[in-house]
Image (cartoon, rainbow, N blue to C red):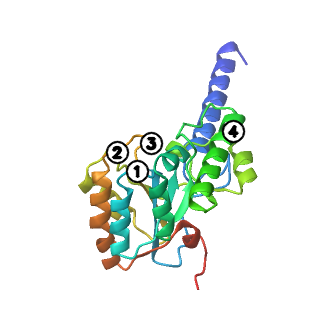
Amino acid sequence: MDSTGLLSGGALVVGASASVLAYAVRVPSSSMLAPSVHQGASARRAIALTFDDGPSESTPELLEILASHAVPATFFQCGANVRRLPQVSRAVAAAGHEIGNHTDTHAALYFRSSAFIASELAHAQETIQQITGLRPRLFRAPYGARWFGLRQAQQRLGLLGVMWTTLALDWKWPQPLVIQRLLQGARNGAIFCLHDGRRLEPKPDIGATLGAVRALLPKLMEQGFHFEKVTDILCPTQN
């Protein structure tokens, strides 16, 4: 093989390796870097609502909307936000919702050391347990990006990674588009990812999220869907 062939072959290998890494890091169905799920059991007409980046000052309004429809949800909370708003985090737990680990500071985990990743998960886990009395069993990586070392960190804390079936894009899209996107993604076992915070931002504007949830719940119920926490929707049967 001449030098041109060698270069071409090398480029193909590098390209394939990059594609595999991108799949491992970002694709919801991947479990290459850590145990992860992205959808629930398909036997029931159920959907799991999940909310990332909280708690925030607007989370209580979201809790009121969910309570008005008797809808349970799963909240992936950042340790720093839990420390900033402990009463709100406790209100989420008191309402019967599930709380998951979303790292301590919402730092992107890619290109980070294993020690950094372990610290982010462990600090959030400790904070959530101390403040709410609940020990998270679920984890969602910020930006949905996993990295090397995450598998060991999750195993050490007994955490299962959770991705999503449909990402709402509610942090950047207006309410009508968020509603349309989620309605299109509605199916048995779907896991929806929304946000009741905006990273560590104080008093974030989550108006699009609140409006979308308020409008979406009755629409999905009219279609025969009910709502479950992530832990429940993963079970193939339900008592």
| Mark 3 element type | loop
Residue at 54% in and 52% down: 28
**Disc 3 or 1, which lies upstream in sequence?**
1
- Residue 69: x percent and y percent? 35, 75
Closer to the camera in the image, 222 or 200: 200
Quarter where residue 45 is shown: bottom left
Circle nearer the viewer, 3 or 2: 2
Q: Left or right? Give the position of 229 relative to 112.
A: left
**Disc 4 or 3, which lies upstream in sequence?**
4
- Residue 103: x percent and y percent? 58, 45
Label of residue 199 in the image? 3
Circle nearer the viewer, 3 or 1: 1
Closer to the camera in the image, 206 or 89: 89
Label of residue 197 in the image? none
Q: Which residue is denoted by mark 1 in the rendering?
A: 56
Mark 1 is on which residue type?
Ser
Mark 2 is on which residue type?
Lys
How far apart, in angstroms, are the residues tagged by discs 3 and 1? 10 Å
Q: Which residue is denoted by mark 4 in the rendering?
A: 148
Q: Which residue is denoted by mark 2 in the rendering?
A: 203
How far apart, in angstroms, are the residues tagged by discs 4 and 2? 33 Å
- Residue 231: x percent and y percent? 58, 68
| Mark 4 element type | loop
Residue 72 drawn above or below residue 76: below
| Mark 2 element type | loop
Residue 202 drawn above or below residue 187: above
Mark 1 neighbour class, 10 Å CA radius: few under 14, some 14 to 19, many 20 or more: many
